Image: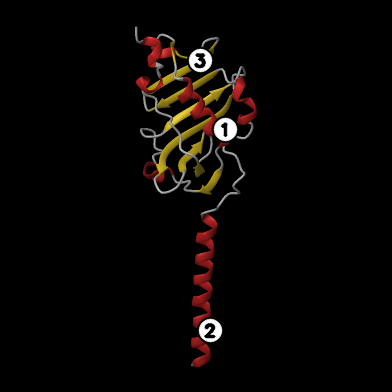
Amino acid sequence: KTPLLAIAALVVIGLAWLTVSHEKSSTTIAQSDTLLAVGLKEKLNDLTRIELSRGEQKVTLQQSDNGWNIKEKYNYLADIGKVRNLTVSLASSTLKEKKTKQKERYEKLGLDEESATRVVLYTDDEAPISDVYIGNQMSQLDGTYIYREGEDQTWLVSGKFAADIKLQFLVNLARIIF
């Protein structure tokens, strides 16, 4: 009877170990130097268009000789500081930790269709150089939840992004005040 109990105990311990090791492998910590948008840092000065969207709202920023203009706001000049902050933050952000692949959990991370802000960056090429959805910011960490277009994997990435698509946030007020 005692050997049978010992074997049963070993089986239970083995199953517990397998369960714990499986849970650890599903939350993968990425190397801190893995960039969110590989190659973006080298092409920041070549950006020509930025598209921001959330749900039915969309804002298009076009590069011009005067800076960044908001297409939907009669080409008013965008706030260059906010544009620079967004693009530099995306270019320097690193992958910290894998999160869920399950779309039904996206809402909790602010990555559902109504909550996430999609940010698409273009150079002169028609193909985007970066295409990400930005969700909630982590309050206790310097991080934000994202996923890249064409992928189901969500990530916690370094940095916090100001990707608000409200026009009053983007417009350079100094240009429109008379």
x 61%, y 17%: residue: 124
Label placed on residue 91? 1
Decide which of 142, 111 is in the foreground and name it.
142
Label placed on residue 50? none
Q: Quadrant of the C terminus?
A: top left
- Specify the amino acid type for callout 1: Ala
Colour convention of the picture: secondary structure
- Specify the amino acid type for callout 3: Gln
Badge 2 element: helix
**Gap in Å between the C-alphas at discs 1 and 2?**
54 Å
Q: Position of residue 3 (x, y in %)?
A: 53, 90
Label located before the other in sequence (1 or 2): 2
**Gap in Å between the C-alphas at discs 3 and 1?**
19 Å
Badge 3 element: strand
Decide which of 173, 110 is in the foreground and name it.
173
Question: Which corner quadrant of the image does residue 21 belong to?
Answer: bottom right
- Specify the amino acid type for callout 2: Ile
Q: Is label 1 in contact with label 2 (beta carbons under 8 Å)?
A: no
Q: Which residue is mark 2?
A: 7
x 61%, y 49%: residue: 31
Is 13 rendered above or below residue 97?
below
Is 127 rendered above or below residue 116?
above
Foreground mark, 1 or 2, reads 1
Q: Residues within 10 Å of mark 1 (few under 14, many from 20)?
A: many
Residue 154 visible in rendering: no
Q: Position of residue 61 (x, y in %)?
A: 48, 17
Label placed on residue 62? 3
